[in-house]
Image: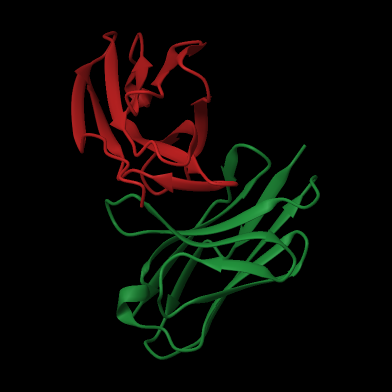
Chain colours: A red, B green
Amino acid sequence: GQNIDQPTEMTATEGAIVQINCTYQTSGFNGLFWYQQHAGEAPTFLSYNVLDGLEEKGRFSSFLSRSKGYSYLLLKELQMKDSASYLCAGKYGFNKFYFGSGTKLNVKP
Amino acid sequence: SQTIHQWPATLVQPVGSPLSLECTVEGTSNPNLYWYRQAAGRGLQLLFYSVGIGQISSEVPQNLSASRPQDRQFILSSKKLLLSDSGFYLCAWSGGVAFFGQGTRLTVV
């Protein structure tokens, strides 16, 4: 639902920076959330944006442009343990969360 | 602090058998509660959403139902499981950000 789109898979090198993009339907939108999910585990919350701009949390940053229906998650100083799927989720209406299909990030040595 | 409990972690059920998955939340009152399903290698599909006791919103017509008999208890049920019901079922609660339980991996055989 809500046309949450993100790339299926990305590969990056340990120590590098990677940007995972997400586009979403703007009608009824109330916030953008990023989650990390390791294989076989439940998603864990990383970051969220309600207003335009950049939110920084350590090695992870998330950006939002409400007018463009666009967000990205930036991961710096990549580590092998960052290999996981990253889920983009939009909050709509009162409190409904709709997820994209996830971006599988492969970190290589 | 708030915690969410979901059980069992894994379940193997024959086709045509009933299903009951339970989720409970501690440390908060009147949370929004959610059931999601994740097929292998896919994103999270919102199944049910609840804002209060007895209030259930269904997102997708299917072979499943949900109930909320108490403020912090959310139950996912089926009278007769289908092979297509196999997947990773996740319960979540939200007071702003969605947080997930550990998930139940259901295999219908």
Tell me: A71 left or right of B41. right
User: Where's residue A75, x and y in %?
Assistant: 36, 16
User: Where's residue B18, x and y in %?
Assistant: 51, 86
Q: Which of B19 and B43 is in front in this view?
A: B43
Q: Nearer the viewer, residue B61 or A8?
A: B61
User: Where's residue A63, x and y in %?
Assistant: 41, 17
Q: In this view, does B63 lie above or below A105?
A: below
The image quadrant where one finds the N terminus of chain B is: top right
Q: Is residue B17 above or below residue B34?
A: below
Who's the residue at 39% across and 39% down the image?
A38
User: Where's residue A27, x and y in %?
Assistant: 41, 40
The image quadrant where one finds the C terminus of chain B is: bottom left
Q: Nearer the viewer, residue A13 or A43?
A: A43
Residue A78 shows in the view: yes
Who's the residue at 20% across and 38% down the image?
A8
* Quarter of the rendering containing residue A54: top left
Who's the residue at 42% across and 69% down the image?
B106
Q: In this view, does A72 lie above or below B69?
A: above
Tell me: A87 left or right of B73. left
